Image (spheres, rainbow, N blue to C red):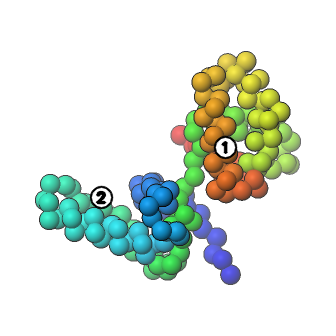
Amino acid sequence: MTIPIDPDSQVSPELSEVMNVLVNNPDVPEPATLGMMREILRHSLADAEREQDRLVGSEETLLAELDALIDAFGDDALASDFVTVSASEALSELIEAILERSDEDEEVVLGDVRAAIDEGLLAALEGEGLIESDEAQAIVAEIDALIERYGTDLPAEDVLRMD
């Protein structure tokens, strides 16, 4: 049985960011785990203590947080399960526009967002001045990357930026 993980409630934004770097590093063997994260942070702390030129307080806090996650989920848990996903401001604007145009009972998923782009919604929003024309390519690349990583069925609301 898989334990559902809500990274927003389990992981600080700082640790999520560090994990995201590890998960997306092509030089790191797949799959990146919490145990692997702990070893990387420990080595980083040891290097910083030898150099004595860096504050290590934040890394010590991240290591303590990571240890608590390992206690709860095990060191073999995938680091990617703890990375918070957040769309760019421009993609969030597009998702908001799709949500406003859809039925409240209907869940909008990433595949729906891509379909709306293919059907011309992005161009329409550019015409309305809601999205800058230079952001269009970045939005398409971002939604494609999210779909590649999480699939077409991930609810679009799960990636909305909440600033």
Outermost residue, front direction?
27
Provide residue 128's location: percent of width, then percent of height.
Answer: 72, 18
Q: Residue at x 14, y 54 (%)?
A: 53
* In the rendered image, the vertical position of residue 116 relative to residue 57, given as above or below: above
Q: How many marks?
A: 2
| Amino acid on which disc 2 is placed | Ser
Q: Residue at x 83, y 39 (%)?
A: 102
| Left or right side of 62 for 125 | right
- SS label for mark 1: helix
Residue 46: quarter of image: bottom left
Q: In which quarter of the image is the N terminus?
A: bottom right
Provide residue 26's location: percent of width, then percent of height.
Answer: 48, 58
| Amino acid on which disc 1 is placed | Ile
The answer for how far apart the CA atoms under marks 1 and 2 are is: 32 Å
- Which of the labelled discs sits on residue 58, or is there none? 2
Provide residue 3's location: percent of width, then percent of height.
Answer: 63, 75
Provide residue 19's location: percent of width, then percent of height.
Answer: 45, 60
Is 128 or 123 nearer to us in this picture?
123
* Residue 10 visible in image: no
Write down the residue under mark 1.
143
* In the rendered image, the vertical position of residue 51 relative to residue 75, given as above or below: above
* In the rendered image, the vertical position of residue 132 relative to residue 117, given as above or below: above
Disc 1: CA contacts within 10 A as few (<14), some (14-19) or many (>=20):
many
**Circle nearer the viewer, 1 or 2:** 1
Of callouts 1 and 2, which one flags the residue occurring earlier in the amino acid sequence? 2
